[in-house]
Image: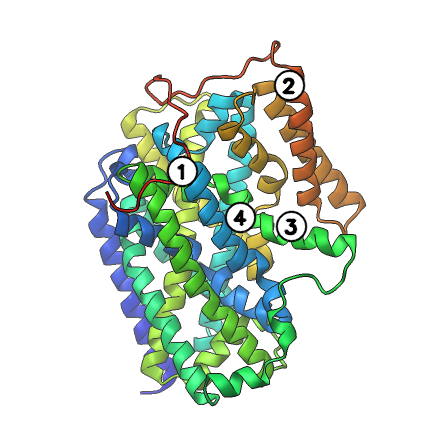
Amino acid sequence: MDQQTTVLIGVGVYLALMLIVGIFAAGRTHDATDFMVAGRNLNLPMSTATIMATWIGGGSILGAAGAAHQDGFLGVIADPFGTTLGLVIIGLFVVRIIRRLKLMTNIQFFEMRYGKLAGFIASVGYSMSNVGWAGALMVAFGVMLESLTGFPLETGIIAGAAIMLVYTTAGGMWAVAMTDFVQIFIIIIGLFILLIVVLINFGGVSAIWADIPEGNFRMIPTEQTGLAWLDYLRAWLIISLADAGSQSLMQRGLAARNERTAQNAFYFAAIGYITLGMIPVILGIIAAVYLPVMDDPESVIIVLAQENLHPILLAIFVGAILSAVMSSADSSLLAASSIITTNMLPYLGFKLSPKGHLRALRIAIPVLGIMAAFIALEVQAVYALVLDANVMVLAALAVPFVLGIWWKKANPYGGLAGMFAGLATWLFVINVYEDLPSDLIGCIACLVTMLIVTPLTQKLSPPRRLVDIDGNEVPLSNRLGTLKIFR
């Protein structure tokens, strides 16, 4: 049996397994709460697995390996380093208070703190971010199938989207969490197999280490210019700060059984993420030495797998890539559909019954999936699309979200002023000064504006209380993620 046939059989078995698990999970989905936050009943292992699987996507494997191949550690500051920092930030500063509010979406926090206009702006920004992220992951799916089987890129994108949409539409968060639990183990096995085989085939750790230039491990900019440092800061913040309030991650905190489970799941996921996320980076750096010329750097890890793995091991590795791609893409589409049906439709005058809400969620996912597939077909670049998906969030939403949790004076006027300042600055810079990191500059403008406007408008626009969905005021004590791991 040749390599291509073995891989195709492995792909077929993997996709069938995901469909079976996802459809099984549909039996646990009875209403919108089950669909969006798994009935708030995920235990620590399940919560940790779904956070890790959500964040280990095409950008983390194909994209990061390609970026490391070109620029070493400096090429992957945003992911995995910034992403790991983001998980720690959420566990330490965000998830306990969000879990305490009993929300269904992160947009409800913006509505509560800053009003419905702020909620509408946030719903647009986070929906765009999630759909763009899903598109990037569909590209990763297509790139992998094209490289390993010769299938056209477009065919791979459409096929991956179709399978993912079936099980996500059927079971929602339960389906996503259960498939994530299976997928994370496939990812672990596949990545470690490839790393071990590559290390052996290229002469072992000591021989490889001697051949790698020191500059590949540099963690600060080589050019000591203001622009270089702005780009560097942007790389750290584009995921870590921008996704501190992301719906796809907040949804996992909201689905956890309690605050302790939610907090610790993010800490364990951070450890697991940096461990697994560094494997593609290391493989990309190794390939830069032994395979220095690549037409498409984002396919470097696939080339390594093709040249070093037995067909059966290659099929397992393909399953790992598929797991990484689909576990992230399904989470993004679930997040976007949750925001649109829970927040945006009411803005447009639609009042949904509980059954109507569940029906709307199951309609929104395939619609958004088609939009993401269209983006994927148009852009066809993994790492850049992952980062670009977050530009509006960093520019206008990240600061109001964090200050809304930690600054008692945060009020509607200050929050809205910051959002509009961030958006206006971002749009101005991106059109006039193309070389500057427009989203980071927008983020700075948002922060400065909020710090100025908020104290000046306390009487005109008093800060709103933080209350849970039942209207009960939420205690603000013990908000830091410092609960003991075990009782």
Relative side of 194 to 404, left or right: left
Mark pair 3, 1: CA separation: 23 Å
Residue 184 in the image: state x and y as whole percent: 33, 61
Question: Which corner quadrant holds the N terminus?
Answer: bottom left
Q: Tell me, what colour scheme is on the image?
A: rainbow
Give whichever of 106, 87 is nearer the camera: 87
Where does residue 9 sit, x and y in percent of width and height?
A: 30, 75
| Rendered location of residue 350, percent (x, y) | 42, 23
**Location of mark 3 (residue):** 234
Residue 299 drawn at (x, y percent)? 53, 73
> Which residue is depicted at the point 43% across and 42% down?
92
Q: Nearer the viewer, residue 157 or 103?
A: 103
Q: Is residue 62 above or below residue 173?
A: below
- Res. 385 image quadrant: bottom right
Q: Which of the two labelled residues, at mark 3 and mark 2, occupies the earlier sequence position? A: 3
Q: According to the image, label 2 marks what residue? A: 455
- Label 4: element kind: helix
Quarter of the picture containing the C terminus is top left
Q: Name the residue at 58% across, 69% down.
A: 68
Q: Is residue 166 visible?
A: no
Q: Are marks 3 and 2 in contact (CB under 8 Å)?
A: no
User: Tag 2: residue type?
Assistant: Pro
Marks 2 and 4, Cα distance to the nearest angstrom?
27 Å
Q: Tell me if residue 104 comes above or below residue 44 in the rendering.
A: above
Q: Which mark is residue 240?
A: 4
Answer whether residue 238 is visible to the viewer in this image. yes
Q: 217 or 482, which is in the foreground? A: 482
